[in-house]
Image: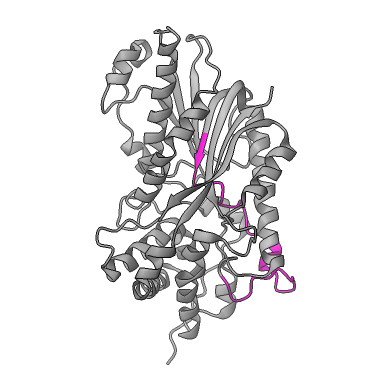
Amino acid sequence: MSPPMSNDVVVSNMDLEKLLSMKGGKGEASYANNSQAQAMHAKSMHHLLKETLDKVELHAPDTPFVVVDLGCSCGSNTLNVVDVIINHIIKRYEAIGCFEQPEFSAFFSDLPSNDFNTLFQLLPPLVPNSGVSTMEECLAANNHRSYFAAGVPGSFYRRLFPARSIDVFHSAFSLHWLSQIPECVLDKRSSAYNKGRVYIHGAGESTTNAYKKQFQTDLAGFLSARSVEMKRGGSMFLVCLGRTSADPTDQGGAGLLFGTHFQDAWDDLVQEGLISCEKRDSFNIPVYAPSLQDFKEVVEANGSFVINKLEVFKGGSPLVVNQPDDATEVGRALAISCRSVSGVLVDAHIGDKLSDKLFLGVEKRAACNAKELLEKLQFFHIVASLSVAQ
């Protein structure tokens, strides 16, 4: 007797904004416990971040200095980058002989479904008497923060802050997530229908072009919102998954993460009669890894920002393993990495039990191809340093 097919409701685009998040909590597959690779990639780009911060206009210390991390998620990475930003700005004030510290505010922003509770539990206590601390006290205050903190739920593809209120925007590893799956990709009557796939890696030209158009529409909305919210003299540092190929059907590292063993595990569920073909085909990962040209076209068309730097940066592997020769560990690392970023969507689409089975399938298939994964699974990032056009 065949097992019953999953009949969970398909996640609609309307629900995506309410649902999309990295895996919350502090469990084995949580983002908080599986974002070490992102932390290493971010640290390798600190010199580029500081170059951007050097372009920010410093104002009188009686005016608060405001920093925003967009797509903050729920781990410690966002706290680390805010510390880097504020400490660098403090040193810039010192370098010009200004030892009176402005008050700092940091806004942590993500979609409403983000696990803000876990994030704020990681937040260190405020420096005692923070409002009147000297710069030396702030820089020396280990395990304390020198800024006021707040969470801001909402999509960064729309306005989130008052006009001319933000000095520095930072966003890392988030802008490749689309605001929605293009409707034509889910329409069986469309040439862009992504039949047989759960991601666009290796899909047809119509499908990948629909994703590209959605990415560029989203990025245009992002830039338009930030151009209103940023103070004159402000700057922005952006990092998202990118690709080196001009061909959008080749999604690079994202393609290997979502278009190979992850894809095969979905096909296994279909072949075992646990879900229908239609159920699989109605699930699509809302990620697009742009080329440098894809990104540049939108920034130039927007016209609100000067490009200080725009480049492709090799970030390395998303897998963190202690024993690279242990195929089982490599397989598990890939499955957990994949689940930490896509698990919430998968759970909603097919339910927890089938989700467990799917990611176990990812783990087994990845273990059988561990050597190839370690050699080929490399992420490239688009890195953009932008300042408000005067």
Residue 107 makes an appearance in the image = no
Residue drawn at point x = 64 percent, y = 24 percent? 163
Given residues 348 and 33, the one toward you in this image is 33
Residue 112 appears in the figure = yes
- Left or right of residue 71, residue 182 in this image: right
Magenta span includes 155? no
Query: Is 249 placed above or below 120 here?
Result: below
Residue 120 locus on image (x, y percent): 36, 37
Image quarter in which the C terminus is found: top right
**Does residue 89 sit above or below 317 in this rendering?**
above
Query: Which image quadrant: the N terminus?
Result: bottom left
The residue depicted at 35 percent of the width and 70 percent of the height is: 370
Name the image quarter holding residue 228. Answer: top right
Determine if the magenta segment contains residue 189: yes
Q: Position of residue 386 (x, y in %)?
A: 60, 32
Horizontal and vertical percent for residue 156? 58, 40
- In the rendered image, the vertical position of residue 205 relative to residue 168, given as above or below: below
Residue 199 % position (x, y)? 56, 66
Q: Which residues are magenta?
A: 170-197
Residue at image coords 40%, 55% = 318
Location of residue 56 with respect to 157 vertically, above or below: above
